[in-house]
Amino acid sequence: MTTERIIIVGTGVAGLTAALAARSRGMAVTVLTKATIDQSNTRYAQGGIAAATGPDDSVEAHVEDTLRAGAGLSDRFVAETICGEGSRAVAELLAAGVRFDVVEGQLALGLEGAHSRPRVLHANGDATGAAIAEALIERLAASGAVVHEHALVAELLRSGSRVAGVRLLDGTILEADAVVLATGGVGQLYPYTTNPTVATGDGLALALRAGALLADVEFMQFHPTSLAIGGNALISEAVRGEGAVLRGADGRRFMLDVHPDAELAPRDVVARAIAAQMRADGGAAALLDATSLGREQLAQRFPGIDAMVRSRGLDWSREPVPVTPAAHYLMGGVVTDDDGRTTVPGLFAVGEVACTGLHGANRLASNSLLEGAVLGRRAIEALDLPWPDGSRLEHGEPIVLTEPAADSSVAGRHEVQQIMWRHVGLERDGAGLTSAVTRLDQLIMPPPTDVKSAEDSQLLLVARAVAAAALHRIESRGAHWRVDAPETEPLGRHSAVVMEV
Ligand SMILES: Cc1cc2nc3c(=O)[nH]c(=O)nc-3n(C[C@H](O)[C@H](O)[C@H](O)COP(=O)(O)OP(=O)(O)OC[C@H]3O[C@@H](n4cnc5c(N)ncnc54)[C@H](O)[C@@H]3O)c2cc1C
């Protein structure tokens, strides 16, 4: 079958890239997004996009950094594919009109945590995601794709074994030869998150209910440094890359005792060290000291963060500011191959919703915009290739989720978020995880009538998947830290979750 009509769900970097690639091949493209077109995690990305473009860099070095961060669960083949296409993705973004920052005629390259050299391209200092989204949205407007805003996808529809369309919240049915999920992350599972309100994990729940396999969803990355005043706005790792340091209440640089890379250690290490320091300091937030950068550099290199910090009444060029970890990025997701194909024919997943195997147990900073840009295009190129038989990813017996009993208690989003923060957060243990799984399995959400309630029921299913996977992983690895099992097993294994359908 030749693909002619395609539905793309989501307007972040992954969905926009896929839509443009499909239009350039002359397909009839319908893009659906549940809020306005500019609402996405992509828009908030600050640090930039990682790609080996510098003269002293290589794809091999980028791959090795990615694998090291992934703590034994990243797939080398996938990392080689995606890192290997980094230069091409950057060239395509430049061609689409993204203006990356330039120094002395060369693309400026930032250094971020766990990268062995500077390789993170950025735009407008710290507004890379917005620059990418704006350029791609402008291209999309001129591409002839049909775009529906405020069109929440509530169900994937199947024809036989294939996904062949979607049902929207208002009941509208749309049919297609293939559906590309590009629905982003799950930050709203937690009360403290750097993610915008649209990040409710819809794509994972839609895929589960359509029979697709999820993997490694226990690996939730908590960003170490969100501002602890006025919400949880992110302060990019790039600020530490430029020289900012972390201090406890007594002013001591505690990361020096924790890891050889100090403030630029992998995110999970920094986030847990901050949490431990906060406990030692009686709950007081840790301090990010960027004073050595000076007022001018902070304003020039990080104009967006600088404005945000100052809007909270803080002058970070003169004094350290309080920071705390917050839920940021889901490494696992809907299992796909390196072309975005899920385990259900006709259904693709690209970007943060997917688990390609690139990120393993911990994402290397700035690899997610890259993955979205590369996979968005690759999925379209693979539309008419034969569907693989099952998943490339080797995993044990999947955890099987069932629909809750009709007499379960009706929950609200707040209750789910509190359970997740308390028991399925930065530090976990068997007793807490067991109580989380037991409680979440007893809950139902009210029937979906509007966007919020539709999101709530997806969120609850995703919470159950994440908590169950975390309970089953009795080791510590990457972003998954079990206080009761601090060792890492010698052999990495992937977890898997399916739904009884
Ligand atoms: C504050 C912040 C800073 C970050 N900084 C960086 C960085 O510097 N570098 C980096 O690489 N990564 C960064 N990340 C991560 C990165 O931004 C995301 O992983 C990436 O942008 C995800 O892109 P995506 O296209 O997969 O999804 P998103 O950009 O999240 O887009 C998802 C889209 O799907 C839509 N959608 C969701 N559910 C439905 C539904 N049911 N029906 C219809 N539409 C739906 C949403 O409305 C949205 O348009 C950052 C993330 C945050 C939050």
Image (cartoon, rainbow, N blue to C red):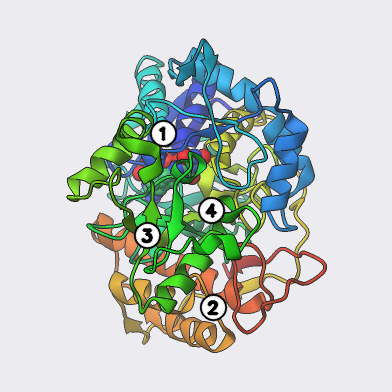
The quarter of the rendered structure image containing the C terminus is bottom right
Which residue position is annotated with label 1? 129
Of the residues tagged 3 and 1, which is closer to the observer?
3
Which residue position is annotated with label 3? 287
In the rendered structure, find residue 263 and report the number of the disc placed on it: 4
Which residue position is annotated with label 2? 428
- Label 3 and label 1: CA atoms lie apart by 26 Å
- Label 2 and label 1: CA atoms lie apart by 32 Å
**Three-letter code for the amino acid on which mark 4 is drawn:** Glu
- Label 4 and label 3: CA atoms lie apart by 12 Å
440 is higher (above) or lower (below) than 478: below
Q: Kindly indicate the quadrant of the structure image that contains residue 252.
A: bottom left
Secondary structure at numbered mark 2: loop
Some atom of ligand 1 lies within 8 Å of the CB belonging to the residue at label 1 = yes
Between 463 and 238, the one lying in front of the other is 238
Going from N to C along the chain, the mark reached first, 4 or 3, is 4
Q: Position of residue 123 (x, y in %)?
A: 42, 26
Going from N to C along the chain, the mark reached first, 2 or 1, is 1
Ligand 1: image quarter: top left
Going from N to C along the chain, the mark reached first, 1 or 4, is 1
- Label 1 and label 4: CA atoms lie apart by 24 Å
Query: Is residue 366 found left or right of 72 in the rendered image?
Result: left
**Three-letter code for the amino acid on which mark 2 is drawn:** Arg
Secondary structure at numbered mark 1: helix
**Three-letter code for the amino acid on which mark 3 is drawn:** Leu
- Label 4 and label 2: CA atoms lie apart by 23 Å
At a point 54% along the width and 37% down the height, the residue shown is: 372
Going from N to C along the chain, the mark reached first, 3 or 1, is 1
